Amino acid sequence: MLHHLLKDRLNKEGIEYQIYLSQRGKNNMQFFQKAIEKALERDNTRRKKPITVKFKCDIVLSNQYPELSIVDYLLWALQRYILKGEDRFFMALRDKYNLIIDLYDTEHYKGKEKENTNYYTTQNPFDVKKASNFDK
């Protein structure tokens, strides 16, 4: 999952990225850091010239970082739409989602047609009717 979140986003040398994970249950700093390193290594295998990306990561309380609460709310609204069919929260925020990727829709990976892809953008808005079946 972390690979998909970071894929092609940490791609500049000479700056240091700050990556935060919201404290939940038994989050482990060692596993978090290893997951980031693995995602960066995976990105480097696709580059012609591998780069060294500097980063610091930390597990933080979401009440100390309000931006994490916003992300949590957006994800909750999407989850409620997918799992319960309740779309009022998602629809109220629909224009705030720049990209939604249906990782489970392997049939439509790299779809050439906008309507036939697992990537949902402002030009191809997410709709559960277009998405793959989600196991509940």
Image (cartoon, rainbow, N blue to C red):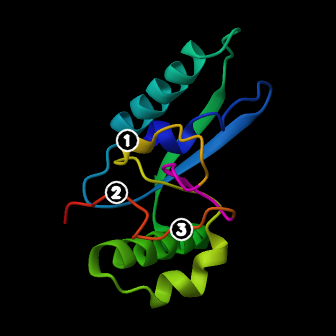
The secondary structure that dominates the magenta segment is: loop
Give above or below for 18 relative to 91. above
As shown in the figure, which amino acid type bears the numbered disc 2? Answer: Ser
x and y, in percent, of residue 65 in the image: 58, 68
Question: In this figure, which residue is indicated by the disc labeled 2?
Answer: 132
Q: Going from the N terminus, do you reach mark 1 or mark 2 first?
A: 1
Magenta stretch in the rendered image: 115-122
The answer to whether the residue labelled 1 contacts the one labelled 2, judged by CB atoms less than 8 Å apart, is: yes
51 or 128: nearer the viewer: 128
Q: Which mark is residue 71?
A: 3
Determine the secondary structure under disc 2.
loop
Q: Residue at x 36, y 86 (%)?
A: 86
Q: Name the residue rendered at 67%, 39% in the picture.
A: 17
Residue indicated by mark 1: 107
* Comes first in the chain, label 3 or label 2: 3
Callout 1: 10 Å neighbours few (<14), some, many (20+)? few
Q: Does residue 121 belong to the magenta stretch?
A: yes
Can see residue 1? no
Rounded to the nearest angstrom, the CA distance separating label 1 from label 2 is 9 Å
Give the camera-side residue of 91 and 115.
115
Residue 67 left/right relative to 14: left
Point out residue 53 in the picture as x, y percentages from the top left corner.
66, 25
Say how many tags the image has.
3
Q: Residue at x 59, y 81 (%)?
A: 93
- Drawn side of residue 69 relative to residue 51, left or right: left
Q: Residue furthest right?
A: 14
| Coordinates of residue 51 in the picture (x, y in percent) | 69, 16
| The N terminus - image quarter | top left
